[in-house]
Image: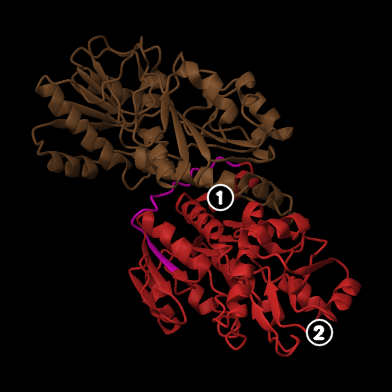
Chain colours: A brown, B red
Amino acid sequence: MRVHIQNDPAEPVFTVTPELWAEASARAGEKNHQVSFGLTPEEFREALAEAEVVIAAPSTLAKLLPAPAPRLQLIFCTAAGVDALAPFTNLPPGAVLVNNRGVHGAKAGEYALMALLMLANRMPALATAQRNHRWEKHHGSLLAGRRLTVVGLGDMGAHAAELAARFGMEVTGIRARPVPHFACVHVLGPEALDTCLPRTEFLLLACPLTAATRGLLNRERIFLLPRGAGVVNIGRGQLIDEAALREALLVGHLSGAVLDVFTEEPLPPQHPFWETPNLILTPHVSADDPARYIPVSLDIFFANLQAWREGRPLPNQVDVVRGY
Amino acid sequence: MRVHIQNDPAEPVFTVTPELWAEASARAGEKNHQVSFGLTPEEFREALAEAEVVIAAPSTLAKLLPAPAPRLQLIFCTAAGVDALAPFTNLPPGAVLVNNRGVHGAKAGEYALMALLMLANRMPALATAQRNHRWEKHHGSLLAGRRLTVVGLGDMGAHAAELAARFGMEVTGIRARPVPHFACVHVLGPEALDTCLPRTEFLLLACPLTAATRGLLNRERIFLLPRGAGVVNIGRGQLIDEAALREALLVGHLSGAVLDVFTEEPLPPQHPFWETPNLILTPHVSADDPARYIPVSLDIFFANLQAWREGRPLPNQVDVVRGY
């Protein structure tokens, strides 16, 4: 097929190189594709006149679309969260949208367990003390046996729940379609969140950003958490009322937070989060392992391409109504 | 027996209260002890004229001994590391020294796994970036499958090795008496350290401070580690050449370090470690869980007291020649 790969010059670590493409093609036994690589808007527009498949990050596509794409049939996003493309009205009509769900779970799970251990060990308070050159003994506690609520049991949330359960935590899952999960004591629908929060010691947000989840952790819900609870966000910044979260940290209602995602990214140098006490922030890196990211993404791409060719349901097709 | 408990007024969280003593006595079925509680040097000296057993932290005893203790038979330290009492020449002659080894393992193991996950996730670099209000994408990697060397397989090191192995790490143990351990692929003697370091991706120090371990991680050994390695210290600060460690972080030889113990504690406000890039420090809290510390210590005390009364070997007796 005629495949166009549009890389983002600002993301050299996540570039689909000809070498990675060749290796993944060989692993999949796929040989007869005509592939082009682009970095500029001109290269994108030119390739789209012919391309049947395009591979790019959602943020890249959001900048370049709409564009005429008369032969396009498949769009493969090198990301799982496609909220940058919502409400999906700029996508070429008739093209199927596929994401790389499955790439992030292993790394995101380890990051989540790290963040939970950091909360139990009071690292947010200790990091604040280090910033102030102060030797303050904030004593932690064991994580094993504690109660965790995971919102979103997709690839990332499920991996996190599994590691937490293996670690001896009592895990409750919240998801849109509440079916049992082996790592969770309970899996409940979103309507159960408010009754679940008061007994949540640790809250992990790992859900996509959609119309239904925007602002999910609002001020009221933050203060439904018990005093001393900890919050981790590896989903999207817009899931949280960030001003209310900051307030809950300042007044000591929450003992700490570990955030990897923010409403505004990169977080501006003057943003109050940099210096908010008991807040540890990381720059949207929780789920990305450069050593595996593009190779695993391409393996997922070829698995979907084969399903598409054979007329089977695509394992990674995005439901543009739900938004994930 | 006549038991004296000397608490440290500076450590209210780790105070042996009459309530905790009564609860532990009841758990152990021990009823007929005459117990006194002291906070001042005068109370200590007065009680020691009669006491058969004394319970205190090593740092407390180091300040108060030598002192006449004509009837003293058992000294129970509410700590595992008794290096503050070395070379043990101030201990009343004839009294047996016992520590609380076994209290720290569960908490120290969780801290160690947290620290290893933090190193794999580049948290030291990310925390440095947060201190500077800089959005710098330092990408991490998976911890599972990586190589860890643990120096010291006592209570803390063994718990850490076990969690790391459960997490899929390949663990090598180094200890004075190298006997096999189920969590370790190899257990080697101290003489193997130099050949082990070049293939160590993560190094965890969890050994006691003794004449044999002082300065163990010297400059030469730090630079035997491969470029990009990470170091965790939950033993004692004096195990490490701290100036050389700082240099290795500054030149990027080590990718990060997580240190809980320091040669000088509390670390002075002007110490260069507070601002050393890629260094995360915590104030000697890694192994202490206030909720369990004194109750479990007292359970260990009574187990040793019963062994002593029955003429059995004491499970926690300190070998003052080895120093632990």
Q: In the rendered image of this protein, does residue B310 appear above or below residue A298?
A: below
Amino acid type shown at disc 2: Ala
Residue B26, position as x, y percentages in the image: 66, 58
**Depth check: B223 or A223 in front?**
A223
Residue B110, position as x, y percentages in the image: 51, 54
Spatial CA distance of label 2 from label 1 is 39 Å
The residue that label 2 is drawn on is: B69
Q: Would you say residue B229 is visible in this rendering?
A: no
The residue that label 1 is drawn on is: A142
Q: Would you say residue A130 is visible in this rendering?
A: yes
Q: Residue under mark 1: which chain is it in?
A: A
Q: Residue furthest front?
A: B32
What's the magenta region?
Answer: B134-149
B104 left or right, relative to A64: right
Q: Is residue B195 magenta?
A: no
x 67%, y 33%: residue: A227
Amino acid type shown at disc 1: Leu
Q: In the rendered image of this protein, does residue A129 appear above or below residue A148?
A: below
Query: Secondary structure beneath disc 2?
Result: loop
Q: Are marks 2 and 1 on the same chain?
A: no
Query: Secondary structure beneath disc 1?
Result: loop
Residue B92, position as x, y percentages in the image: 76, 87
A219 left or right, relative to A94: right
